[in-house]
Amino acid sequence: MKEAKILIVDDNKSILSALDLLLNGSCKKVKCLSSPNALLSELKEDNYDVVLLDMNFKAGINTGNEGIYWLNQILEYNSGMSVVMITAYGDVELAVKAVRSGAVDFVLKPWENEKMLTTIEMAWKLSRSRKEVKNLRLKESELIAEINRNKNHIIGTSSAWEKVMDMVRKVAVTNANILITGENGTGKELVAREIHRLSNRSQNVMVTVDMGSIAENLFESELFGHKKGAFTDAGTDRMGKIEAANEGTLFLDEIGNLSMPMQAKLLSVLENRALTRLGENLPVDIDLRLVCATNCNLAKMIGEGRFREDLLYRINTIQIELPPLRDRIADIPELVEFFVNLYVEKYNKKGLSISSDAIAKLQAYRWPGNVRELQHAIEKAVILSDTHLIGTRDFVFKMDEFSAVDAYGGTLEDMEKQVILGAIEKQMGNLSAVSAQLGVTRQTLYNKIKKYGL
């Protein structure tokens, strides 16, 4: 107890002297008060660990009500304070009342010194544990707030993207398991984080696991945790990712990469809502919201015997399909502006901007890598730019089926015409679908068709 700070409140000066003498060599600080009136102000002056509180202060009154009153005042000020009650009257009901009111223990006068020291040490350890738990909770809440703060850059106002976000807002407030599908680079993790942010679990952590990166021999240890000595390299106890997400959200990315044996183990945990750490026998109950993501065709994989149908049903209460960037052309200017500002600040390129011609060129490209490819293209352009304006020459795309710019060349109007033609062909003449793909109104589309004589 060398670090303990003890506050003693008793109207008997001989009691104060005896306790002061007993504790002074064992504790960092011992403060004695002969009246409880200064008790709260003293607690505000220093960070005490334990309060030893007499139950009676007025002569001839032995009900203990004064002690209970001051105990309540202490706990109202600091609910984690360890308070030990002391009284000369061995009334069991009084002791029970004090403990029920929040005292950690009860000591009778006269006491045995060894027992008093043991009681105070126990109260000090409890106080220290409570402080550690409180600090951990504060730290956790700060970390969660930091994780959630300004991390979700959900950008887009096109009709295709608004449909996605409308679905996100509807399902986020439920506990339904979500499967997010779409091509690589479409923002599946961002959408998962938005679902968590809008959910009732947002004050708890979201744990992300890349299922494709976990070696099969480490699968159970990583996801379920293990006890020290469970296997050769298990030097300490470890909590698994699933248990770490308890009361929060578990995001399993690239779920389609799981082998069949790993799928069976995961399914068992999801069905039982419990897991057992390696090396232990007792299961641990879990309560979490499951969000999965994949760019694989899971239905096709089921037909090929590479994915369990029952696992798909378990993870796929609601499916959200993210559109590729080529179907969100109207969102490209806003995405470009965001990424330009991001990398201008990161690489200290103040005053750098991007031309409207360059944005038009980016809108004409098919973006097989989706938003992630656009982000990398902008970052590269910002880094290599020698002027204050990023132009069309700062973006060079390969000659392939995705590049409308290099395939057709010509003026910006030529490129726009080819983009509209491509959309009409893809949507088989359905102009409502074409306007949705291009992110423009039907009237704007009609005007463009008329303008180019399509």
Image: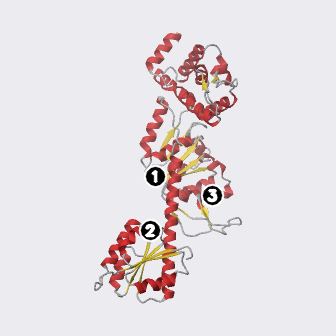
**Are circles 1 and 2 on residues that touch, CB within 8 Å?**
no
Q: Quadrant of residue 377?
A: top right
What residue is pinned by disc 1? Answer: 201
Image point (67%, 58%), residue name = 218
Residue 348 point in image, percent of width and height: 64, 34
Q: Residues within 10 Å of mark 1 (few under 14, many from 20)?
A: many
Say what amino acid the circle numbered 3 marks. Glu
Residue 270 point in image, percent of width and height: 52, 56
Circle on res. 416: none
**Residue closer to the observer: 103 or 57:** 57
Residue 90 point in image, percent of width and height: 36, 88
What residue is pinned by disc 3? Answer: 222
Residue 66 point in image, percent of width and height: 31, 77
Q: Give the structural element (helix, strand or loop) at label 2.
A: loop
What residue is pinned by disc 2? Answer: 80
Query: Whole-Å distance between the Cαs marked 1 and 3?
Result: 23 Å
Q: Which label's residue is closer to the chain start, 2 or 3?
A: 2
Q: Is residue 127 visible?
A: yes
Q: Is residue 317 visible?
A: no
Position of 231 relative to 322 (above/below): below
- Residue at the far left: name it: 60
Query: Whole-Å distance between the Cαs marked 1 and 2?
Result: 26 Å
Say what amino acid the circle numbered 2 marks. Gly
